[in-house]
Amino acid sequence: MGRMETPPTFTGYRRENGRIGVRNHVAVVPTSVAASSVATRLASDAVARARATPHQMGTSQPEATRRQTERTLAGIGRNPNVGAALVVELGTEDVDAGALADRIAGTGKAVETLTVREVGGTSGALDRGATALERLNAEAESARREEADASELVFGVECGGSDATSGIAANPAVGEACDRLVEHGGTACFSETPEFIGAEHVLAERCVEDEVRERLLDRVDRRERLADLMGTDIRGAQPSPGNQEGGLTTIEEKSLGAISKGGTSPVRGMVDYAEDLPVGGGLVLMDTPGYDVESVVGKVAGGAQVIAFTTGRGSTTGNPIAPVIKVTGNPKTYERMANNMDVNASTVIDGESLETVGGRVYEKLLAVADGTPTEAERRRLEEFAVNEITPIELAELEARG
Amino acid sequence: MKGEVLDGAALRMAPADTVATALEDLPAGRRLSVEGRSVELSEAVAFGHKFALRAIEEGEEITKYGYVIGRATEPIAPGDWVHVHNVESTRGRGDLRAHGGETA
């Protein structure tokens, strides 16, 4: 196969806890929707490395939902791409800013908090926040890139706006890159549990432990039963009207194409939404919804430093904290949206081997880790959303105990 | 690319598949050879869409990637376009259970 025996290297920012960041952002993390506007304003007015993560959660949430929001925001702040963080609250939130800051500070990075109500409202918050960001920026600035190897990468893979080319070209090409990373000792993660439906038997056969297999089948069953609970079928949403236009007929067909983006390695684990992903962990699944922005955020909160995102029809999704590499297998989409695409995998359809195209994805992953900006980064596409556990999911969770 | 390319214009992902995917916009009447047989498209099949490689009975499972992707809701002739109008998913069908039907 001609593969390298020693893992390739890149340069990244070594954090106090030993993890390697591929970016050196100052995260501005609001604890709720009520602090999101001021967080966005602070980040856009401030130093170039500031990145806001505005969202809709954090107020009046049931306990399980609040815990998930906290885990997500803490994970975002803890991600090694973050060099320092500012946690912003209005002062009324269920999510406690101090506790959140402590969880982030556990990684050894500088963290400050800002409470809008206690610093003179929005004007005071903008003044105090700007000063805090200057301090935090100075902390982050002291980090220097040093050599790291591919085994230290946690690579999240995602698909959105799928069509028939996704399962033929872009997903298997990204899967090839995942296989190489896993072979080099790294971690690859894919998610979107509703898009395991109809392909779970293929994944189940690859689970190394019975416990992982049972967890996987249980999570798929849970997502599928939500359709039963609502007395509807999932065909309205899965495949989406866009997927159908692109030639995908059923969820089974979409899933069988979707799982190829994780490659062919054994499945070593399955974690919850935004739960920590292991370093050097091989192929690990995450239980997330199919909505791609929330799903990307879940993996970044789990510690993924780089995301690859395959799209047939042409998604533009980025992320504020992790670079998102766009890969399309559709030649027309590549032509129409070259300014959003990082890798053209449509050459697979013309006969270029998956090994070659997958090799290009892997090289792009290492280059991006080393500092090359993605198209989404160049255009500051930084979508962010935290998954909300819906009331019907909560009821189902409670019923299960 | 995994699978077998048919006359440079379509892709059968696995040998057991009863459908192939168009790799370009294919017009009605286009003939493609599959294991020595000829399949003529009864209608146009757009890039990325599927057509039947053999006759499929109503209720029969449709196979792509070597796995089941749904079942036929009507008889499908070789060369017919295969999509949501003649195939349904068998999964996540809460609608069937709600109406007292069966799910596979």
Image: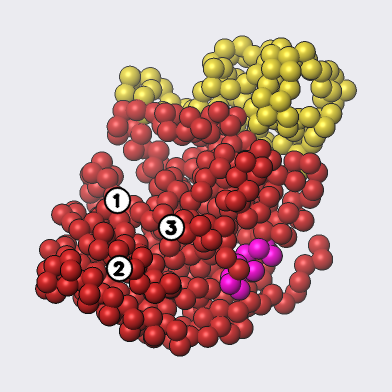
The earlier-in-sequence mark between 2 and 1 is: 2
Residue visible at 27% across and 72% down in the picture:
A87
Task: Identify which residue, A155 or A92, lies in the foreground.
Answer: A92
Q: Is residue A399 left or right of residue A175?
A: left
- In the rendered image, residue A122 lying in the magenta stretch gets the answer no
Residue visible at 27% across and 45% down in the picture:
A390
Q: CA distance from mark 2 to mark 3?
A: 15 Å
Q: CA distance from mark 2 to mark 1?
A: 25 Å
Task: Name the tint of chain A in the rendering.
Answer: red
Q: Could you say whether the residue bearing mark 1 is in a helix, strand or loop? A: loop
Task: Name the tint of chain B in the rendering.
Answer: yellow
Tag 2–tag 1 contact (CB < 8 Å): no
The chain ID associated with circle 3 is A
User: Foreground mark, 2 or 1?
Assistant: 2
Vertical placement of residue A174 versus A90, above or below: above
State the residue position of label 3: A382
Q: For the residues tagged 2 and 1, is the chain the same?
A: yes
Residue visible at 79% across and 29% down in the picture:
B9
- Does residue A157 appear in this view? no
Q: Which residue range is magenta in the image?
A: A362-371
Vertical placement of residue A349 versus A16, above or below: above
